[in-house]
Each structure stands twice: as structure tokens, then as C-alpha cells.
């Protein structure tokens, strides 16, 4: 009979995403899966909990000690909207519209259906805000508290739902995880969580999990997407806080004040707010200068980074900012907002601007577009910055936390990772 201490530690990882609807969380889960799948020196099993009919997006990255754990299917109403070609809410929207899942925020919080308990999960890692109640020790990711800072982007019900869930799942969790020290300080300030309960584990660029594009791929994607010869790039779903509106104003300023016409390309799902962005582009007479591609494949995303001249990231609020690391890894000079955790992540490797001032966005874009020496400098700094982050380190750090929460013996490497200085601090 095998002694209980020799049995593999079973870790559940929440991968309940709807393909092409989840943005940064989907990227995070892919990166984590790729990192954990390469760990061959432990005694763990990683069970990626998916919707029963939505697992193809994560399957290519799950191997080695990782495997799929199928939960219930996507709720019927959401699937009906998908098949009918209607405007489909993202998983975050579903979290906001809880009645489609059979419960209401005013009544209760979602509870485990028993899938992870039957699978023998000993630690559950909730990778997004839409967790559920369980007695299994858990890690919870409240990626940001945007609703407290930008309440105009949320309905009263959405704000109440976020507050109810965030506070309850932070209370339930044995460990609350954030990707930047700024977010940790914010959680302490607003939710009064014990400092020791919040652990900062930075993510990394998901591009390292993908196969690098070939020259023929670049040409094929340029042709398929009708891309200009060169362009400024912004990968982001069209949420209001992503600030496409301010970026369009900056492009119009460059054209009117400097005679500089910069082609602009944006990828990411086009949600309901996109209609307002389209109206802004028409009002500013930019429709022939800007392109919104919608969701793109991993290969297409890599090609867009390879083909663009620069990346601009004008978001008004972020809990981490994965596109910054993607740009650094891809060798793309970058400008980004000076808000929340972005300066912490960017260091000296990106130009910073106030996202509420289109003239500052315009000036950063002008410098990136016209100054080749500056672009070379930022590319070099970006490469050094990106070297601080890797999915191998992130996966090993999470493994150390999984072992700690399950009461398993820690290795010397585990203890070193748990005590190591935060790589996300500005140097």
C-alpha cells in the first residue's frame, strides 16, 4: 500500500473560459499550463478545470503532469447566443449577469458542483474573479479593483456583484494572488486583507508558449489581414477602460498638428463598446487609417508583433499588463500609460504618458514613430526587462505555494522562491 505522503499532490486550476472571449486571463492560463507542463521534477498532478465543451483552446498546452478535468458544459443560454451569432457576453460579462447561470448575486454565491472534490483536488487555484465556494483550500486572483476607481464603466449591479464576490472569495482563500506590488497595496487599502495573505507572483509573456512564426507565416498573415506596410499596434479587447477613444484622439492630433498619419491596427474581441469606438473613428475621419481585427489566433498575434513598428498601451487601469511583456519579448518599442502597476512593470523600457491626455499619447507615439535611435534603445531595455520574467519561474513559484498550502514538504528551491525578492519591482 502506498503511503499517503507519496501520493501525488492534486492541484485544480480554473480554466473555465469560453474560446476567444477571455483576453488576459486566457493568456495567463495558457502560460501557466505551458510552464507547469514542463515540470518533471515533482510529485504533482495539475487538473485544468474546463467547461465540458470548451477545452480545445487549452489542450495544446496541457501535457506532462497536467491534464484536463471536465466540469459542466457552458450554460445553455450562453451557448445558444454563441450558436445564434448574437452578441455574446464574455466570461466576465457572465459573471456580471449571474442570472444566466441560475443564481443571483443578491441571493448567494456559486458553490462547487463537486467536480474538484470527486477528483481529489487538494488545492484549488482560481485564476479569475469568477470562483465558487468550496472547502478545498484555494488561491484567488482578484486581478484589480477597477470598479472602485472607474465606476462609470460598471452598472450598479455589476459593482455590487464584484464587491460581493471579491470580498467573499478573498475571505475564503488561503492565499490571495496578485501580479504586481501595486495591486497588493490596493487590496490592503480597500479590503484590509492581512499583508501576509497576499502573495505577488508576476506572470510572463505568453509568446514563449507559442511556436515562433516563419517568414511565410508573416507574409500570409499580412495578406490575410490586409495589413499596411508598417503600423502602430494595440492588442486589447474593446473595453471602455482600454482607452481606444483616447488613442484615436491622439492619432487625429498627430495628423492635424504634425501632418503625421500613422496607420493603426488593434486586435482583440470587439464587444458592445466597439460601436462607440466606431463612431469616434468616423467623427475624427480616421476610418481609412485604423483597423480593428477582432480576435486573432496565437500565430496571428505573434505576426502582428513582428510586423508592427511600435506598440502603444493607453489603458486607464491594469492589474498587470501582459501586452507590455509580450512587446518586450517580441522586440517591439513601446509606450504605455503611467497608471496603476504599469510603471512598475515597464521600468525604463517604455515611454510613459497620462492616458487622460491625448496630447501626451500623441507625443509618445510621434517619438516612437520617428526616432529610430529611441526605438533601438527601448528594444534593448525591453529585452533586459523581459529577462526578469519567465513561465518556468512563475510555474515553480506557484508549485511552491501549492505545496505550502497543502502542507507538503518544501524543497530548498521552494523556500528560495518563496523568500526571493519580487522580480516585478522597478530596478
Image: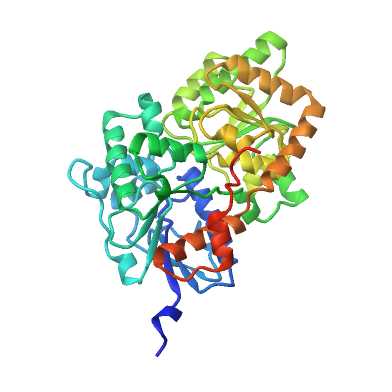
The residue at the point 56 percent across, 71 percent down is: 64
Residue 379 image point, x, y percent: 75, 37
In the rendered view, would you say 420 is above or below 224? below
Residue 35 image point, x, y percent: 58, 60
- Find the residue positioned furthest to the left: 107
- Find the residue positioned furthest to the top: 257
- In the image, 208 versus 269, the foreground residue is 208
Question: Is 165 left, or right, of 425 in this rendering?
Answer: left
Tally the marks. 0
Residue 186 image point, x, y percent: 42, 35
**Rendered-image quadrant of the C terminus:** top right
- In the image, 306 versus 195, the foreground residue is 195
- Find the residue positioned furthest to the bottom: 1
In the rendered view, would you say 47 is above or below 164? below
The residue at the point 60 percent across, 66 percent down is: 38
In the rendered view, would you say 4 is above or below 345? below
The figure's colour scheme reads rainbow
Question: Is 366 left, or right, of 417 in this rendering?
Answer: right
* Residue 89 visible in the displayed image: no
**Rendered-image quadrant of the N terminus:** bottom left
The residue at the point 57 percent across, 44 percent down is: 296
The residue at the point 62 percent across, 37 percent down is: 426
* Residue 178 visible in the displayed image: yes
Q: Quadrant of residue 193?
A: top left
- In the image, 115 versus 270, the foreground residue is 115
- In the image, 350 versus 112, the foreground residue is 350
Residue 277 image point, x, y percent: 49, 24
Amino acid at each position: 500500500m502506498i503511503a499517503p505522503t507519496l501520493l501525488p499532490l492534486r492541484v485544480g486550476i480554473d480554466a473555465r473560459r469560453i474560446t476567444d472571449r477571455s483576453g488576459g486571463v486566457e493568456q495567463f492560463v495558457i502560460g501557466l499550463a505551458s510552464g507547469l507542463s514542463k515540470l518533471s521534477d515533482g510529485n504533482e498532478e495539475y487538473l485544468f478545470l474546463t467547461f465540458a465543451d470548451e477545452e480545445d483552446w487549452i489542450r495544446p498546452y496541457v501535457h506532462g503532469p497536467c491534464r484536463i478535468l471536465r466540469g459542466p458544459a457552458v450554460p445553455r443560454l450562453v451557448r445558444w447566443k454563441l450558436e445564434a451569432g448574437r452578441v455574446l457576453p464574455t466570461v466576465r460579462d457572465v459573471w456580471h449577469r449571474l442570472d444566466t447561470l441560475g443564481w443571483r448575486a443578491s441571493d448567494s454565491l456559486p458553490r462547487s458542483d463537486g467536480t474538484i472534490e470527486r477528483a481529489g483536488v487538494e488545492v484549488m487555484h482560481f485564476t479569475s474573479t469568477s470562483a465558487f465556494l468550496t472547502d478545498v483550500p484555494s488561491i484567488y486572483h482578484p486581478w484589480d479593483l477597477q470598479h472602485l476607481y472607474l465606476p462609470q464603466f460598471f452598472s450598479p449591479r455589476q459593482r455590487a456583484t464584484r464587491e460581493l464576490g471579491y470580498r467573499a472569495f478573498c475571505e475564503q482563500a488561503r492565499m490571495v494572488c496578485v501580479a504586481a506590488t501595486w495591486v497588493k497595496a490596493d487590496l490592503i487599502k480597500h479590503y484590509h486583507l492581512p499583508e501576509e495573505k497576499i502573495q505577488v507572483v508576476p506572470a510572463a509573456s505568453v509568446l514563449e508558449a507559442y511556436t515562433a512564426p516563419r517568414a511565410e507565416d508573416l507574409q500570409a498573415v499580412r495578406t490575410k489581414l490586409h495589413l499596411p506596410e508598417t503600423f502602430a499596434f494595440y492588442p486589447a479587447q474593446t473595453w471602455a477602460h482600454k482607452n481606444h477613444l483616447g488613442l484615436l484622439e491622439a492619432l487625429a492630433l498627430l495628423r492635424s498638428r504634425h501632418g503625421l498619419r500613422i496607420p493603426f491596427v488593434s486586435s482583440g474581441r470587439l464587444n458592445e463598446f466597439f460601436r462607440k469606438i466606431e463612431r469616434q473613428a468616423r467623427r475624427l475621419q480616421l476610418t481609412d487609417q485604423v483597423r480593428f481585427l477582432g480576435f486573432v489566433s496565437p500565430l496571428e498575434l505573434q505576426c502582428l508583433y513582428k510586423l508592427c513598428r511600435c506598440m502603444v498601451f493607453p489603458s486607464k487601469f491594469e492589474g498587470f499588463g501582459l501586452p507590455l511583456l509580450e512587446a518586450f519579448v517580441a522586440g517591439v518599442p513601446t509606450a504605455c500609460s503611467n497608471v496603476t502597476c504599469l510603471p512598475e512593470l515597464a521600468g525604463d523600457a517604455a515611454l510613459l504618458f497620462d492616458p487622460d491626455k491625448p496630447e501626451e499619447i500623441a507625443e509618445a507615439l510621434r517619438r516612437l514613430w520617428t526616432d529610430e535611435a529611441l526605438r533601438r534603445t527601448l528594444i534593448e531595455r525591453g529585452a533586459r526587462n523581459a529577462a526578469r520574467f519567465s513561465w518556468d519561474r512563475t510555474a515553480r513559484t506557484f508549485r511552491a505555494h501549492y505545496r505550502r498550502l497543502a502542507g507538503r514538504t518544501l524543497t530548498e528551491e521552494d523556500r528560495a522562491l518563496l523568500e526571493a525578492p519580487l522580480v516585478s519591482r522597478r530596478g
